[in-house]
Amino acid sequence: MRSAAACLAGVIVFLAAAVAGADVDEYLGKPVASIRLASEGHDTVDPRLLQIVQTRVGRPLTMVDVRETVVHLFSLGRFEDVRVHADVTPAGVALIYELMPAYPVDRVQFMGSMEAPGVDEGRLRRAMVDRYGPLPVSARAPEVARLLEAQLRDRGYLHASVAPRVELQHAPDRAVLTFKVDAGTRTRIGTIQIVGSPGLSEKDLLDRLDIPLLPIVQFSLSCIIKRLAQLRREQP
């Protein structure tokens, strides 16, 4: 529901910008000459969809009718995105509602630098599941990718990138969500500088933080931060 609302807001903002720009007089108030509903490159004449379209051929184009149509189409739960295209013809405005089907994701897979030291597919998948569930909707794929990049940075891959790809399949309609991992070069900690007075010797502090001898190849930034927080709580 949150995803649909976010997409809807984006569609309305995009449409308002497109119509309210230099072409306002060319669209709003002019009679609607034609209305098409298209999905995956093909027109649809589904009567259930046509019935909820608020814009009408022969009536002046209004933003209210367009927005209500987008809201009704989203309310069906069948579409991940709805885009509105308009063009001026001699007879009036030609409208196209482009419908992006919401294919259920039935599989998530990882590929790329999965054999690199410290890159754990199980850990990446658990992070995804904790935040987005085992089968995230495809619209959240970029957000999942950013989360996975943060997980890799925590393991020392400070310049890692994750590219999401959604593969649509039919009979039945479903989607496969793939994340291609490019871990890059793993960062090593060569020196550690302690600023301030921790109340411990440098060796004791590093022992408490469970930091091994330098240079450090394998480390977890989040674990180091948690140990620092615990150490602060233990200090009088």
Image (cartoon, rainbow, N blue to C red):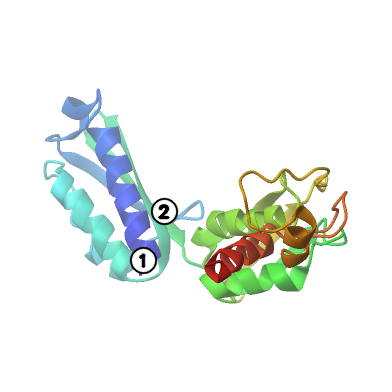
Residue at the image position 27 percent from the left and 56 percent from the top? 70
Closer to the chain start, of discs 1 and 2, is: 1
**Label 1: which secondary element:** helix
Q: What x and y, as percent, mark residue 172?
A: 59, 76
Q: Which amino acid, by three-letter code, is at mark 1? A: Arg
The residues bearing labels 1 and 2 have C-alpha atoms spaced at a distance of 25 Å
Residue at the image position 61 percent from the left and 56 percent from the top? 145
Residue at the image position 74 percent from the left and 64 percent from the top? 110
Which residue matches tag 1? 2
Quarter of image, res 85 = top left
Which residue matches tag 2? 38
Instruction: Answer left or right for 69 relative to 6.
Output: left
Instruction: Answer left or right for 75 relative to 221.
Output: left
Residue at the image position 41 percent from the left and 53 percent from the top? 38
Which of labels 1 and 2 is toward the front? 1
Q: Quadrant of the N terminus?
A: bottom left
Quarter of image, res 210 = bottom right
Is residue 73 positioned above or below 104 on the image?
Answer: above
**Front position in the image: 22 or 154:** 154
